[in-house]
Image (spheres, rainbow, N blue to C red):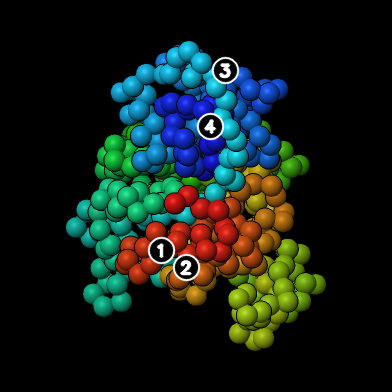
Amino acid sequence: WSGVAPMLADPWPLDKDPPRCYFVHSYRVPMPEGSAAWALACSEYGERFVCAVRHGNCVATQFHPEKSGTAGLQILATWLGGSAPSGPAAVAPAASVQPAPPARRIIACLDVRANDAGDLVVTKGDQYDVREKGDGGVRNHGKPVALAERYYQDGADEVSFLNITAFRDMVLADQPMLEVLRASAQRVFVPLTVGGGIRSYVDGNGQSYSALDVADAYFRAGADKISIGSDAVDATRAFYAAGRKGDGTSSIELISTKYGRQAVVVSLDPRRVYVADRGSTEHHCVGPLGSEKGTPKGPNGEAFAWYCCTVKGGREDSEFDVVQLAQAVEALGAGELLLNCINRDGQGNGYELELIQQVKSCCTLPVIASSGAGCPEHFEDALRLGEADAALAAGIFHREEVPIQKVKAYLSTTCIPVRC
């Protein structure tokens, strides 16, 4: 989400002070020397570039109005209902041009699964356990489409769906989940991410499907990004076995080649493994632990830990730590990393800052912090101390303990740029 600054005095169909809009691709039009009648607006991401051009009623934008919330919809409505200025008014330059900096994102996550009656519901785990402690039923926070629309209206920058039972199911036969995406895309005008079951599989009739087939179905249903979990561990294993190179057949490579790496999020489910010192393991460690906002020391006073990547919803450990996996999937073509710390899930005591910092320092990909948010201050910690590019939460939004607008209102007082 980057600021869009008009370069013409009459920026139709843009507003004279437009808010941030949603960008995807990294291509750009270089800035002209001086003013140019065709250069409608510019933005900044590393450098300043032209992000919108106009010739008469013909307007082209690099950002996506249909994914830029109500502001984007207003741009489309203005274009459809009006006409461009003519004569000298069409080419008069703006008095000043200063785009707002890119915003840090606040993402609402919806864990979706069938309850015991077979209905799709949004649930939330406590360290990945989604069953109520009393009756043992699946914790139910509401219907997926209704919640997604609520979060969009409340200012979420993205909405992420995670089909948390998809590793056991035949994904392309999961029509209810695909229908959730279709219905959400008609109501939610910010980016939609979907994860769960992005892998190759064989159905009960012996028909083979590739991970790309699964991703194709999700994209056609309305997804803007897909999130790969357990399959990324398999891809990492093959990457290192081949001497740190891909062979073009992994789900990450196939999907990023067709849709672009910006459409591929790799979701990591790490858990802490405490050790006495760095020399006790070959894995990449964090520590010393025990700072005020950081990771606590281990049960036996251990001051160091490494993060073991798990698979199948945290049920099984892999042989990789987060640094090994992050570097492998970046090389294979991933565009973003989502960090879900199992130890923090559902605890409400803050994000795992050492985990975020370690991953940010070992790769160049944008990082989404997840697991542990309990108050607006935790979002600030993840974005400022952890240097995350985005922060994701679920339970506190579902239970309406902390609305998204309250989080953004707080962050705006800390000078962290957010889309309001």
Q: Is residue 43 left or right of residue 147?
A: right
User: Which callout, 4 or 2, points at the residue further toward the start of the chain?
Assistant: 4
Q: Say what secondary structure mark 4 lies in.
A: strand
**Is residue 322 in sight in this rendering?**
yes
On the image, which quarter does residue 405 sit in? bottom left
Q: Which residue is mark 3?
A: 37
Residue position marked by numbered label 2 in the rendering? 376
**Mark 3 and 2 residues: CB-CB less than 8 Å, in contact?**
no
Q: Nearer the viewer, residue 58 or 365?
A: 58
Q: Amino acid at mark 3?
A: Ala
Indicate left or right for 176 with 190 as reference: left
Residue 116 percent location from the top left of the image: 23, 60
**On the image, numbered disc 4 is attached to which residue?**
6
Q: Which residue is mark 1?
A: 406
Disc 4 to disc 3, how far (Cα)? Answer: 12 Å
**Mark positioned earlier in the residue sequence (1 or 3):** 3
At horizontal 19% and vertical 58% (from top left) the residue drawn is 117
**Residue 282 image position (x, y, % from top left):** 76, 64
* Viewer-nearest of discs 1 and 4: 4
Q: Is residue 275 left or right of residue 68?
A: right
Tag in front: 3 or 2: 3
> Which amino acid, by three-letter code, is at mark 1?
Lys
Q: Is residue 150 left or right of residue 55?
A: left
Which secondary structure lies at badge 2? helix
The reply to whether dot 2 and dot 1 touch (C-beta < 8 Å) is yes
Q: Residues within 10 Å of mark 4 (few under 14, many from 20)?
A: many
Q: Is residue 207 visible?
A: no
